[in-house]
Amino acid sequence: MAALGGRGRAAAALLRRGPGTAPAAILAAGPRRHRHKEKWATTAPRVPSTRLALHHFDTSYSLHLGALWPSVRAGLLCEQKYGALLNNFAAVDHVPQELELLNATDFIFEAHQKVQQWQRGAAVGEAARGCQEGSGEGRTVMQAEMMAQAEMSPPPCASISSKIKCYTFPRGDITRFRPARPTSLGLLDYYLMDAASLLPVLALSVQPGDFVLDLCAAPGGKTLALLQTGFCGHLAANDVSISRTKRLYEILHSYVPKEVRDTVSVTSYDGRDWDQVKGGTFHKVLVDVPCTTDRHSAMEEHNNIFHKRRTKERQMLPMLQLELLMAGILAAKPGAELVYSTCSLSPLQNEYVVERALDIAEAQFDIRIHVEDLSHFRTLFQDTFSFFSDCRLGELVLPHLTANFGPMYFCKLRRM
């Protein structure tokens, strides 16, 4: 009997129970194994989503980035670096000293120091020109050097908020930050995030009293950064996902006091319909759209948009992004500023979406949009991030083993 195997043993046992039960039981026992195999084959993907993502990236990004792609690929597949966004609403006087002892620095403060140096250089250059014109003599070598330095300096960006403070470790330093801790006020002392995610917020340049819309706000890191400026007259934080909106609520309650939370309205509208809710009312609009989230897609199977069941959703992403950007444009007042951003390297999700939105805004709505120059960000933040120099519109932070932030694309627009 042992030679019959598992199936034979099951049949023999049923036969011993009596002839009445044998046929149906045997039939039930037979196909069950095959049904289980069929279910396994339909639920377990033959090729992991991460492998599909990397194959797609290798095909498209090797053409887009050229010789840079191997190092960018290596960065995507290695541990991401983080920045510590200080919480101005908590008692954090001791935190900067603690982080500086670990050799971390506030990269935004360092950018402000560069701006001050450029301003001093420009003033010296003007003085040198004045000396030349007043004396009527030729320039000395020193005057020529000062004037050349002033002319080479990019335009200072004094509008970058000095109230946002974010500490990062130097290039090549892979030290990890400790988890955030509650302060005496009951609020957490800092928020860990990809430091490149702050660049769209800095580019938006919120001014005192601005009405601000964060159209795709969850999970809430950029929303928190907007509040750190202390300038939002009102902040509308919207996200279509109710589950992700819950995470946004958690961050607001963990980091922001009640009197500031009262200036924030959290909603779960479909962002594409926002212009029908409050069109033409905001001074600043952040449109941080859903995308292929390249780093997550290359590293994580969970919720991976390259899963075969999400193929159509992924293919429709540029259309969704365009609709969201158009809704943001229509939600902005004339003269308002918008920032469009993704965490993808794909030009189809980045520059092409912006270009198409500019065409539609003018052709269908008679709205002219001006693309703002953000090239000075490359000079301001080149010590912290690796930038792609060949973006047609906007700026792109590339992952790199020594500065493993991003990817982060951002483009600033002004509604005329």
Image (cartoon, grey):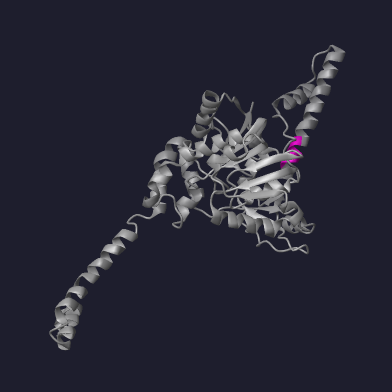
Above or below, 362 relative to 283: above
Image: 165 above or below 416: below
Q: Nearer the viewer, residue 402 or 184?
A: 184
Q: Which residue is drawn at 36% across and 51% down?
A: 308
Give the image location of residue 401, x and y in percent: 54, 49
Left or right: where does residue 62 sit relative to residue 160? left
The location of residue 184, given as percent across then percent down, is 78, 64
Asked whether, in this view, residue 292 is left or right of residue 146, the answer is left
Residue at 60 percent of width and 40 percent of height: 277
Residue 17 is situated, as x and y percent measured from the top left of the image, at 17, 88
Residue 12 visible, this angle: yes
Stretch in magenta: 111-115
| Quarter of image, res 40 | bottom left
Q: Nearer the viewer, residue 192 or 12?
A: 12
At 85% from the left and 18% from the top, the residue drawn is 131
The answer to whether one can see residue 411 in this image is: no
Image check: 392 left or right of 2? right
Image spot of residue 353 (x, y percent)? 50, 34
Q: Does the magenta stretch include residue 216?
A: no
Give the position of the N terminus as an image quadrant: bottom left
